[in-house]
Image (cartoon, rainbow, N blue to C red):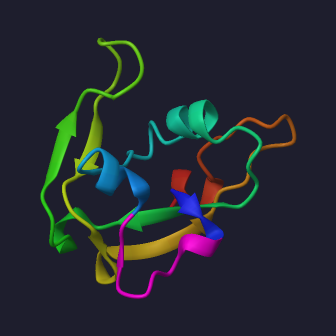
Amino acid sequence: MCGRDEWPPQDVYRPESLHVEGFVHCSDFGTVHLPANLLFSGRTDLVLLVIDPARLDAPVRWERPVVGPPDGPWFPHVYGPINKDAVVDVVDFPPGPDGIFALPAALANP
C-alpha cells in the first residue's frame, strides 16, 4: 500500500523502506489490514497495489514482521524496487466510517 500521490512512479516504485531496511513491505489479502491499522491510522489517501509476484524483477521472501508478535503471520518482503508491470491493479483503500481498515470488497470477492 502507498499514498495515492506515490503511484504511479516515474520508473519503478522505491518506497523509503527499501532504502532504510533493504526491502519493500508487502501483505497478502488476509493481512493487509494489520499494517494499515498499525501504521496508517487516520490516513484517507491510501491505495493497494495488487502485485503479481511472477512479474516482479526482485525476489520475494516471506518473513516474520518487523513489528508485532513473533508468532504472528509472516509477510512478503520484496528485496528490490517494484517494477510497474508487476502491479496488475490499484485499488482505493480508505478506512471505514469507524477509522478501521478492512480489505476492500472488490478484493475480498473478486
Q: Assess whether residue 45 is covered by the magenta stretch.
A: no
- In the image, the segment drawn in magenta is 5-14
Q: Is 72 positioned to the left or the right of 96 in the image?
A: left
Which of the 4 image quadrants contains residue 66?
Answer: top left
Across and down, in percent, residue 25 comes to 36, 47
Residue at x 15% of width, y 45% of height: 61
Which of the 4 image quadrants contains residue 92?
Answer: bottom right
Residue at x 76% of width, y 55% of height: 44
Across and down, in percent, residue 68 comes to 42, 18
Residue at x 80% of width, y 37% of height: 99
In this view, 13 is above or below 95? below
Which of the 4 image quadrants contains residue 14?
Answer: bottom left
Across and down, in percent, residue 18 comes to 31, 55
The foreground one among 89 and 108 is 89
Q: Assess whether residue 8 is covered by the magenta stretch.
A: yes
Main secondary structure of the magenta stretch: loop
Residue lying at the far bottom in this picture: please name it: 10
In this view, 89 is above or below 107? below
Residue lying at the far front in this picture: please name it: 20
Q: Is 47 positioned to the left or the right of 56 in the image?
A: right
In this view, 64 is above or below 71? below
Across and down, in percent, residue 6 comes to 55, 72
Numbered marks: total? 0
